[in-house]
Amino acid sequence: MTETNESNENNPDIEISRRRLLGTVGAAGAAGLALGATGGALVQSAARGDSGTGGTTGGAGSLASLGATRVAFDGDHQSGITTPLQAKGHVMAFDLAPGAGRKEAAALLRRWSDTARRLMAGETAPTADTGIALDAGPSSLTVTFGFGHSFFERTGLTDRRPTALDPLPDFSSDRLDPQRSNGDLWVQIGADDGLVAFHALRSLQKDAGDAARVRWQMNGFNRSPGATGAPMTARNLMGQIDGTGNPKPSQPDFDKRIFVPGAGPGPAEHAWMGGGSYAVVRRIRMLLDDWDKQSTAQQEQVIGRTKATGAPLTGGTETTTMDLAKIGADGKPVIPANAHARISAPEQNGGAAMLRRPFSFHDGIGADGIPDAGLLFICWQADPLRGFVPVQRKLDRGDALSAFVRHESSGLYAVPPGPRAGEYVGQRLLEG
């Protein structure tokens, strides 16, 4: 995957509209904007101060142009996969309405794609815009669409369902709510402004009309760009730096790990997924009261990294490679055998890797005074049977962190490649 910087004059796809220019930055500020293209998604990452995918938040210098950040809808891959973490997020699943099939699904994906393409460009919704985001620019809005296992029965396309979409195995730590799991269709929305994100959520819900019904919907957040003095990996609600080991687009095998190859292996009827990816989505409740009772030293033993810097317990900085063989003065491994970082490390799982791009969530405090909070875990990979599944199996057998988390919902979705200009997401499947 390559990254290029282009001026606005040379690339009409990223021209800043008059509405966004007036609504978000002055003429002097707009003159210096530089845009980068990564994997078909055009993002103004330089202005935000982002330095990677899914694990960094921008520095204070990005605030003046935050609203003008635009991510392209069309491209080799859908947006929201390699796009840097966004401050606000919504994920939701739909089930096709009784009697709806392939024809209705195609019409719905066409409507959704039209709406997403316009909103991501900072324009109004094509029909009955609510006015929620009239004063805002696109604010790095991304909309991502995926298909669940059941979608293919509903549309008569079971012969085109990839084997990689087979249901995930059961894990002993699962406490899954079936009403908040799976679904025919999956939508991920992210933006750096809460109103822009909600505007997209509301628009897509209205677009569903009588064709599909919401099965479940969840809200999330991350640190806002500009909240830290310099770009840094985000923290989760346990206070841990989260995302250090993410694959980077600069790595030569990044595309191989994250995206389905464009041609083979596999039957020709699965070729529609070439350039796509698979998303595993899990609502992971963090038992924060129990976690907060642990001392910092105890928390670090559970994770295998220092809390302040994210460095491995064997020394160095956040990006230093863990020395898994190092033994302490007590004769025990410095990074405990059941430490989360050890068990989930790619070198401990045959090189299995996934791109983690989560949102935190907080859905209030229960009558017992315990916060309903945690992680909307979203990870991307070319094949979940070689990415998520083997790692989760090992975590399920002995991760020290398991005592402080609860997996409450789950879903696996085939996310097709990005659309070409004028195409809708999934068109190569539904009309192929």
Image (cartoon, rainbow, N blue to C red):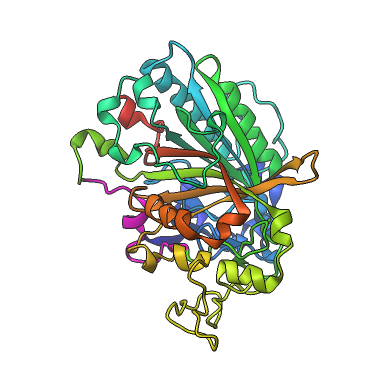
- In the image as oriented, which residue stretches furthest toward the top? 99
Main secondary structure type of the part rendered in magenta: loop
- Magenta stretch encompasses residue 253: yes
Query: What count of labels does the image hold?
Result: 0
Which of 291/120 is in front? Answer: 291
Which of 200/6 is in front? Answer: 200
Q: Residue 370: x and y, percent?
A: 76, 46
Question: Residue drawn at (31%, 19%), measured in percent from left and top?
Answer: 156
Would residue 330 appear left or right of 28 to someone viewing this image?
left
Question: Residue drawn at (46%, 36%), measured in percent from left and top?
Answer: 145
- Magenta stretch encompasses residue 385: no
Q: Is residue 432 visible?
A: no
Q: Quadrant of the N terminus?
A: bottom left
Which of 221/372 is in front? Answer: 372
Q: Is residue 145 visible?
A: yes
Question: Residue drawn at (50%, 81%), measured in percent from left and top?
Answer: 332
Q: Residue 46: x and y, percent?
A: 56, 63
**Residue 213 vertical placement versus 388 (above, below):** above
Residue range in magenta is 246-263
Q: Residue 248: x and y, percent?
A: 43, 63
**Residue 431 vertical placement versus 414 (above, below):** above
Q: Residue 359: x and y, percent?
A: 60, 49
Q: Quadrant of the C terminus?
A: top left
Question: Residue drawn at (33%, 46%), measured in percent from left and top?
Answer: 275
